[in-house]
Image (spheres, helix red, strand yellow):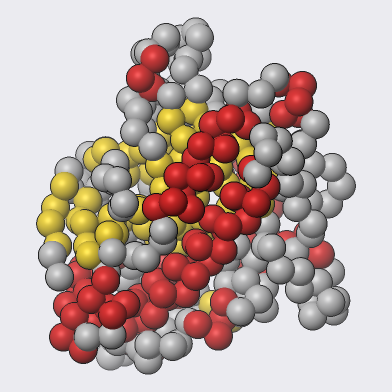
Amino acid sequence: MASTSVLDIPTIDVSPFLAGDADGKAAVARAVAQACETVGFLVISGHGLPQTTLDQAIERGLGFFDLPQAEKDGFHPTGTARQRGYHRVATRNLASTMGQKTPPDLRESVYLGPIDDHRDHYAHLPDAETAYADNTMPSAPNGFDAALVDLYRGFERLSRDLSRIMAVALDLAEETFVPLLDRHFSVFGMHHYPVLGLPPEPGQLRAGAHTDFGAMTILAMTEGRGGLEARLRDGRWAPVQPGRGELVVNLGDMMQRWTNDRWVSTLHRVVVPEAGDAASRRLSIGYFVHPNFDAEIRCVPSCLGPGESPRYPTITAGEHIRQKIDATHKAA
C-alpha cells in the first residue's frame, strides 16, 4: 500500500483494504485516519470504480452542457425538488453557506437525488418528502440519463466501501456505518466550469469557499486551469488535482460532528482562471454522502477521551441537513 504526498494532499491506494488483506486493511486505515485528522482531504486510487463508467458520464455531460441554453433550461426543476435537475451559470452561491456575501458562482450544474424512493418508509417524517423527491433527469444527449444513473450507482457502492475504511480508521467495527446507508439521501452533482468570456466580478469564484454539509464527498474531475483548492491548517490554499483513475475524498460537517471535531471538514473553493483561457474548461462530479434520513449523528465512542463530553447534541441526518440549509437561507 503506497501513500505519497502530492501538493500537500495525501494519495492513498485503498485496494489492499478492499481486497480483504488484514495487514493491508490496517495500513490503509492508518493512512486514512492521518489524512482525516490533519487535512480532511485525500486522493484515492485502487477504488474499483470503472474508468469506463466515469468516462461515459463525462463525455455525455460535456455534450449536455454544449446544448443551447433554452434546451438545458428545459430540465430545470419545479415543485418540491428544487435541487434536482439543471441550474444555469451564476444562479448559486456556495460562499453564502458560510455567511459570506459574494457574487454568484461561475458554474452550471446538473443535480440528482437518490435513485431509490424511500418516501413510503419515511411517510411519518414530512421533511423527508423533499430528500427523496423525484429527479428531473436530462434526456439529451442520448444516453446521458443512463450514464448519470450508472455513475450514481458506482459512487453509491464506493461510499459503502469508504464507510468501512473510515470505521476501522476510527477504531470502530468495520460495518458500523453500513446500516446507516441503506436508505441514504445522497446528492450527486455534475458541475461544468465554462471558459470565462469576461473577467469575474470582484470576489467572484467558480465556486465560493465552503464546507460540505454531509458525511463525506467523493469527487471526480477533468483537468483544466482554475481548479479545486483546499485550505490547509496553516492557512495556505493547496491545489487538488487527481490523476487519471484517481478520485478525491473530502470530509463534510456531519463527519466532523460524528467525530467530535477529531476529523476536519475543510474549507475548499474553485478558483477562476483568466478570461478566454481555452484550457480552463473543466467538469467536476461530486457525490455528497448523506446517510439515512433518520440516522443518528452522535459522537462515536472512540472520539471521546477520558473526562471528555460530546461537543454536539445527538441529531438525525435529516435534521442536520435541514439546519444547515436554514442557516444558509438566513445568511443570504
Residue drawn at point x = 67 percent, y = 62 percent = 114
Q: How many circles with numbers are drawn on the protein?
A: 0
Residue 307 position within the rendered picture, expressed as x and y whole percent measured from the top left: 31, 89
Give the quarter of the image for residue 293.
bottom right
Q: Does the image show residue 4?
A: yes
- Asked which quadrant contains residue 329, the reply is top right
Asked if residue 308 lies left or right of residue 127, the reply is: left
Which residue is rendered at x = 21% and y = 57% of the image? 11
Q: Is residue 108 above or below residue 123?
A: above
Q: Residue at x 43, y 30 (%)?
A: 282
Q: Nearer the viewer, residue 325 or 28?
A: 28
Which image quadrant: the C terminus?
A: top right
Residue 43 vs residue 255, the one in the foreground? 43
Q: Position of residue 100 (x, y in %)?
A: 52, 35
Residue 304 seen anywhere in this rendered image of the structure: no
Horizontal side of 52 relative to 69 (left or right) equals left
207 left or right, relative to 36: right
Tell me: residue 105, above or below residue 156: above
Residue 140 image offset from top left, x and y in percent? 70, 36
> Residue, x 41% and y 48% (percent of image)?
220
Q: Quadrant of residue 240?
A: top left
User: Seen in the image, is 203 located left or right of residue 25?
Assistant: right
Looking at this view, is 29 or 37 the one in front? 29
Quarter that holds the N terminus:
bottom left
Task: Decide: is 150 above or below 109.
Answer: below
Q: Where residue 47 appears, x then y in whole percent?
A: 34, 65
